[in-house]
């Protein structure tokens, strides 16, 4: 892949008599996949951040590796590609909606983040209010009760964040916890659209404050790599644009199409290639 990509970068791609320039702008993936393609320590390891030199604290029950890079990766040979800056950590789906919002909701509901858990009555009140929120046209999934929180999709977490959270949870969290959450809410709202680009520097400051105060609000033991990586969003927004431009949502949605190409688990790659070739032939103008 690297050899073919470098050839395209060097020579361009001839299409309809024109030479089109080719450049790899970014690699967008979830956290385990990023660590795999870079050949570095996974997100649960020591010195595992893909963007900075902050060191985590090794657990007594787990081995801590002294180095960050584990194996050589051919991505280092891609022309004009920065393996640190061009592999994104600010993936909206995994970093924020699943890794941040869902983690916070589970912690608040179950009391697993150092604060008192919500009672059954509170869960009923929050769920009832959430299910009454009117959905915009772009939201197709029906809101679900908090008892199904473990099964919520990323889009449900995003909908809760933007359209319900700041009102519904206000009376069910300690004042300090709610104010801390509002730092995240305001920052992600600003980063979600280029309309607010003039305020992105403010959003970056809000996320830095959120990460800085996180140990005081919940405890250092609950600071995961997802919460740590929030402070790297601002730099990636300046480099790539709004959160929607470096999100894995489109790729996750396309997975269903790829799965439907397969008839069994036998030689899945060959099956997918054959079905795609058949589709290309079917769509080719006569």
Image (cartoon, rainbow, N blue to C red):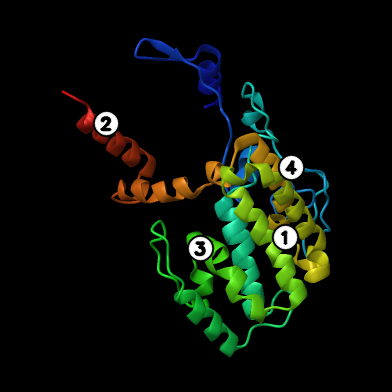
The residue at the point 65 percent across, 80 percent down is 171
Q: Is residue 100 left or right of residue 219?
A: left
Q: Which mark is residue 280?
A: 2
Q: Nearer the viewer, residue 54 or 100?
A: 100
Q: Are marks 4 and 2 in contact (CB under 8 Å)?
A: no
* Residue 5 position within the rendered picture, expressed as x and y whole percent measured from the top left: 53, 23
Q: Is residue 199 left or right of residue 267?
A: right
Give residue 157's quadrant in the image. bottom right
Is tag 4's residue or tag 2's residue first in the polypeptide sequence?
A: 4
Q: Are marks 1 and 2 in contact (CB under 8 Å)?
A: no
* Residue 60 position within the rendered picture, expressed as x and y whole percent measured from the top left: 83, 65
Give the quarter of the figure containing the C terminus. top left
Q: Is residue 229 left or right of residue 274?
A: right
Residue 39 visible in image? no
Q: Which residue is mark 1?
A: 224
Q: CA distance from mark 4 to mark 2?
A: 40 Å
How crowded pointer 1 is (Cα within 10 Å; few <14, some 14-19, many 20+) is rated as: some
The kind of secondary structure element at disc 1 is: loop
Q: CA distance from mark 3 to mark 4?
A: 28 Å
Q: Which residue is mark 4?
A: 51
Q: Are marks 1 and 4 in contact (CB under 8 Å)?
A: no
Q: Report the mark closest to the observer, 3 or 1.
A: 3
The kind of secondary structure element at disc 2 is: helix
Q: CA distance from mark 1 to mark 4?
A: 15 Å
Is tag 1's residue or tag 2's residue first in the polypeptide sequence?
A: 1
């Amino acid at each position: 892949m690297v050899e073919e990509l470098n050839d395209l970068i060097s020579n361009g791609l001839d299409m309809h008599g024109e030479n089109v320039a080719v450049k790899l702008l970014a690699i967008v993936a979830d956290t385990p996949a990023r660590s795999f393609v870079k050949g570095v320590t996974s997100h649960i390891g020591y010195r595992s951040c893909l963007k900075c030199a902050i060191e985590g604290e090794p657990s007594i029950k787990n081995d801590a590796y002294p180095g960050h890079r584990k194996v050589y990766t051919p991505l280092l040979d891609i022309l004009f590609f920065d393996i640190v800056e061009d592999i994104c950590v600010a993936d909206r789906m995994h970093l924020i909606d699943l890794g941040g919002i869902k983690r916070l909701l589970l912690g608040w509901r179950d009391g697993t983040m150092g604060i008192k858990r919500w009672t059954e009555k509170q869960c009923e009140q929050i769920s009832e209010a959430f299910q009454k929120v009117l959905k915009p046209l772009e939201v197709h999934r029906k809101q679900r009760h908090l008892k199904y929180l473990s099964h919520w999709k990323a889009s449900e977490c995003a909908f809760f964040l933007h359209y319900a959270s700041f009102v519904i949870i206000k009376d069910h969290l300690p004042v300090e916890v709610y104010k801390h959450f509002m730092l995240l809410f305001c920052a992600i709202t600003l980063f979600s659209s280029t309309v607010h680009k003039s305020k992105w520097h403010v959003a970056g400051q809000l996320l830095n404050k959120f990460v800085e105060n996180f140990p005081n609000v919940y405890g250092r033991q609950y600071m995961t790599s997802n919460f740590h990586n929030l402070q790297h969003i601002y730099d990636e927004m300046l480099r790539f644009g709004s959160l929607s431009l470096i999100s894995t949502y489109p790729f996750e949605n396309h997975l269903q199409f790829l799965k439907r190409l397969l008839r069994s688990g036998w030689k899945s790659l060959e099956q997918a290639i054959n079905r795609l070739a058949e589709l290309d032939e079917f769509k080719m103008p006569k």
